[in-house]
């Protein structure tokens, strides 16, 4: 089944084995609300690291009951992240969720060479969007982890994200290498990278997708813009994956869409031993909930 929206993601979860999420620093209302909802719906089990007293107080404020046996009491965010990663390594949980702690804190434990969850692959963040004025879910990457990717890292980001969309049932994801314009400008390295990524795809060095670039955001997302600007591509107006040229452009685009664009956003880190549900600290419970379902759908 091809997943085109978050409702279809829910249906996909219904047909899969129930998994367990471990939450790092779970003492936060929106995080607990999302986890409890997923649990009550029978979609997943949970382990919670963090301030046990606060976790129980927040659950009580929500009118919900938390099994205290599922709480791993910790004294700091660093300890919460460490214990959450240990739970994955010990087989007690299947995937991670970031709670009330800085992204850098949890990722430090994830990428630790001795005790972390690295696989040797590039690790990148993907934001998945559902918007009222676009016909399917789409991704923007990377707006949260890889600061200034070179050509090789961009290739790795594409490959990781294409693998994710294959799990959605999308056989040939359409990848737009976003730039400020749709023409190559030797003074703008991102346009040179975009052209090379497109050619690598044509040569079979990037497989399982169709890569276009350089391409501007409006052309990637609307056929009208492509028509007006006479840009002929199957990717135009039907993009699945937007590759940002760098973290600043990716982050600003992502935050613009969910702040002013009525977007529902789920966030996930991929490339590690397990997926990691990771959204902004101000993310609404719905976004956190769909991030959990997204991760669960990725676990075999």
Image (cartoon, rainbow, N blue to C red):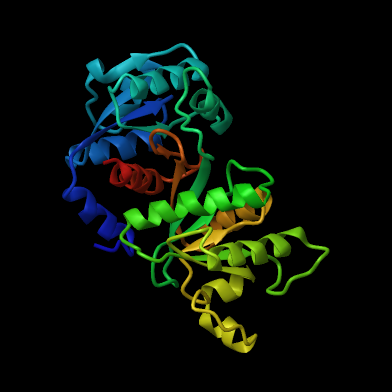
Q: Quadrant of the C terminus?
A: top left
Instruction: Report the front residue among 225 and 59.
Output: 225
Percent across and percent down for residue 264 are 42, 56
Q: Is residue 259 above or below residue 77?
A: below
Which image quadrant: the N terminus?
bottom left
All told, the count of numbered labels is 0
The reply, left or right, for residue 269 in relation to residue 249 is left
Residue 118 image offset from top left, x and y in percent: 48, 30
Residue at point 55%, 25% (across, down): 108
Q: Is residue 128 left or right of residue 6?
A: right
Front-most of residues 146 and 221: 146
Task: Tell me where residue 253 sits by quadrant.
Answer: bottom right
Q: Quadrant of residue 31?
A: top left
Question: Is 233 left, or right, of 293 in this rendering?
Answer: right
Residue 60 visible in the shown view: no
Which of the 4 image quarters holds residue 102? top right
Q: Residue at x 65, y 48 (%)?
A: 247
Q: Picture coordinates of residue 144 (x, y %)?
A: 58, 43
Residue lying at 53% horizontally and 56% vertically, measured from the top left: 140
- Vertical relation: 234 (above or below) 78: below
* Residue 232 showing in the rendered view: yes
Lateral position of residue 12 relative to residue 25, left or right: left
Q: Toward the viewer: 287 or 156? A: 156
Residue 114 in the image, given as x and y percentages of width and height: 50, 17
Direction front: furthest residue: 203
Q: Nearer the viewer, residue 238 or 25?
A: 238
Q: Residue at x 74, y 71 (%)?
A: 184
Above or below, 111 relative to 202 = above
Relative to 260, does residue 68 appear above or below in the rendering? above
């Amino acid at each position: 089944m091809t997943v085109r929206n978050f409702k279809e993601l829910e249906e996909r979860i219904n047909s899969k084995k129930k998994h367990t999420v471990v939450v790092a620093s779970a003492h936060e209302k929106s995080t607990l609300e999302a986890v409890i909802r997923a649990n009550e719906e029978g979609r997943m089990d949970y382990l919670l690291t963090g301030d046990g007293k606060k976790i129980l107080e927040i659950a009580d404020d929500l009118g919900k009951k938390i099994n205290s046996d599922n709480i791993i009491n910790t004294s700091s965010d660093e300890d919460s992240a460490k214990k959450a990663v240990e739970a994955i390594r010990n087989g007690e949980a299947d995937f991670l969720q970031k709670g009330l702690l800085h992204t850098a804190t949890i990722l430090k434990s994830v990428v630790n060479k001795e005790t972390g969850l690295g696989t040797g692959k590039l690790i990148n963040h993907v934001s998945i969007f559902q918007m009222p004025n676009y016909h399917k879910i789409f991704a923007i990457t990377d707006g949260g982890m890889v600061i200034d990717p070179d050509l090789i890292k961009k290739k790795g980001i594409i490959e990781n994200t294409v693998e994710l969309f294959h799990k959605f049932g999308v056989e040939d994801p359409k990848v737009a290498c976003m730039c400020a314009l749709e023409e190559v400008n030797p003074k703008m390295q991102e346009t040179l990278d975009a052209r090379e990524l497109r050619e690598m795809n044509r040569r079979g060095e990037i497989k399982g997708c169709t890569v276009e670039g350089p391409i501007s955001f409006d052309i990637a997302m609307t056929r009208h813009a492509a028509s007006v600007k006479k840009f002929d591509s199957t990717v135009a107006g039907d993009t699945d994956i937007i590759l940002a040229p760098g973290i600043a452009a990716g982050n600003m685009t992502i935050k613009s869409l969910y702040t002013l664009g009525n977007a529902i956003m789920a966030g996930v880190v991929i490339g590690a031993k397990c997926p990691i549900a990771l959204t902004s600290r101000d993310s609404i419970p719905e976004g956190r909930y769909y991030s959990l379902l997204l991760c669960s759908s990725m676990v075999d």
